[in-house]
Amino acid sequence: MHEYQRGVTLPVTMLLLLAALTIGASAAQMAMLGEKAARAERDRLLAFQSAEDGLMDAERDINAGLGQPLDVPATPAQPGSAAPAWQTVDLAGIGGTEYGALTGAAMETGQGVLPFRRPRYLVERVAYTPAGAPPSHYYRVTVIGFGTRPGAETVMQASYTPPLPVRRRSWREIMDWQALHDAASREEGQ
């Protein structure tokens, strides 16, 4: 063996070991991030399903005439006027109606998982006058559904039209509900 070949094996082995350790740590970190993303998506889907359950409970409530919906006048909101009730009511707190409170419905356990809170909803009876027709109304339901952890929330809004039984005409997910609620709360406090 030549004199300069002695001692090269240890540094090369150490570099290979360091490279293998770095790759292993990186793979473990990616796996943990993937698990975290999957858990967040599962919570979002559970909150979405919870909100959908809340919409169905509100529909049963309307059809049975159990609750007292808030009456909303036919006049369109003017700039600077008060925010709509669905923005001012604290559905994430104790505002609105809790799932099953009026209908007696029980939450189903999809795959044994329940949200950490029951969904809450607000029913508004909105007056409007269709072109060439007598005044009428429709129901606007805003509901918040929860996931398995605090902060995992989905807010949905649907429109239902009479006569009974009411039928869902449209729905939307409100992505910025918390910002709208906070802005309406600040306006009320002024």
Image: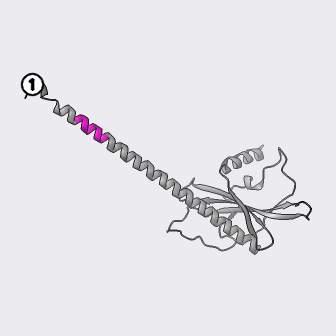
Q: Residue 3 at what x, y percent from top left? A: 9, 24
**Dot 1 alpha-carbon crowd within 10 angstroms: few under 14, some 14 to 19, many 20 or more:** few
Q: Is residue 129 left or right of residue 177?
A: right
Q: Identify the main secondary structure in magenta.
A: helix
Find residue 25 and report its image quarter: top left
Q: Quarter holding the C terminus?
A: top right
Q: Is residue 10 left or right of residue 70?
A: left
Find residue 125 and report its image quarter: bottom right
Which residue appears at 56% of the width and 59% of the height? 45
Q: Is residue 182 above or below residue 99?
A: above
Q: Quarter holding the N terminus?
A: top left
Which residue appears at 73% of the width and 48% of the height? 185
Q: Is residue 25 above or below residue 42?
A: above
Q: Is residue 69 left or right of residue 145?
A: right
Residue bearing mark 1: 3
Q: Label 1: state its secondary structure.
A: helix
Which residue appears at 53% of the width and 68% of the height? 110
Q: Residue 183 at what x, y percent from top left? A: 72, 45
Figure disc tally = 1
Image: magenta residue range: 14-21
